Amino acid sequence: MKIETIDTGYFYADGGAMFGAIPKTAWSRRYPSNETNGCVLSMRSLLIITDTGKIILVDNGAGDKHLKQLSYYNFFDLADLGEELRKRGIEPEEVTDVILTHLHFDHCGYSTQINKETGKLTPSFPNATHWVSRKQWENFLHPNALEKDSYFLENMQAVADRSLLQLIDTDTHLCPDVELRIFDGHTPGQIVPYIYSPDYTYVFAGDVIPLVASVSPEWISAYDTFPVTSYNEKIRLLDEACHKGQALIYCHDAYTKCSTVKKVNNFYTKEKILL
Ligand SMILES: [Zn+2]
């Protein structure tokens, strides 16, 4: 098994929004920001190649279809994920599975792109099964008022039209080495993939724990639609990660990709930096 993170680009998010009720005097000690409180966030994707030949991607960044609409986020250093795969000897057509933690634009925007010849939206990974939770899909189709600006139908419609969508209702194994577990809080039905590799169990924590600074359960982003649920879900994820020595991958942390975590006197902190 091979696993590798691929950063698809970066954007600025307001530090106040990222850390919710936590005052800047506290969060600024854990995460840098610029003079207007902008924090640089990565849009991290994960490439998994299993021993049985599956080529799996977890999340795929914002793509380039809505950059003008989203100019507030000041995206920079955007990479074309298809090109990134080709550099690694993989054609986009060879990707067997795309796991989408959730369907906010910064996680699934590259799922479709505009075909240069036909001008139509087409799936970027035309042979891949796209894994999404049914709860998240329903929320995407009928979003609540707070999330509707984070969703773009164009990111997923062509995937659904080609019957490439695989909706899951409960925790599910994609294959023996990759389990998809469902966590609520940030958004309904977020998928957290657990990758069982010989060295570590890697947990792609998605927006359940987007930054190493967010490992404290009460450090919840203002974007989370159900913060009390987020708090409980984070503890559920962290307790197992501490107990079993699992490695968390932080999808938005521009400075730390992955670490194990430990619990000392009821506080969770990073332990060993990995990847
Ligand atoms: Zn999100």
Image: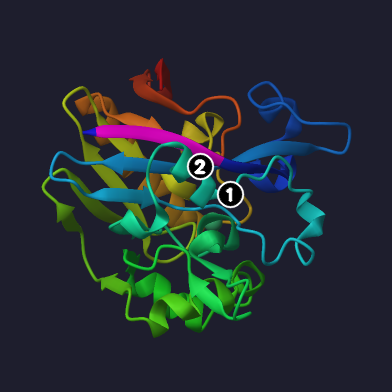
For label 2, the residue is: 84
Asked whether mark 1 and ligand 1 are closer than 8 Å, the reply comes as no
Residue 76 visible here: yes
**In the image, what residue occupies the spot 45% across and 61% down?**
102
Residue 209 visible here: no
**In the image, what residue occupies the spot 79% across and 64% down?**
68
Q: Quadrant of residue 39?
A: top right
**In the image, what residue occupies the spot 50% across and 51% down?**
82
**In the image, what residue occupies the spot 63% across and 77% down?**
145
Query: Quick one: 106 or 182, which is closer to the camera?
Result: 106
Q: Alpha-carbon neighbours of circle 2 within 10 Å: few (<14), some, or many (≥20)? A: some
Q: Are marks 1 and 2 in contact (CB under 8 Å)?
A: yes
Q: Which mark is residue 273?
A: none
Q: Which mark is residue 80?
A: 1
Helix or strand or loop: what does disc 2 sit on? helix
| Residue range highlighted in magenta | 2-7
Identify the residue at the far right of this view.
Answer: 35
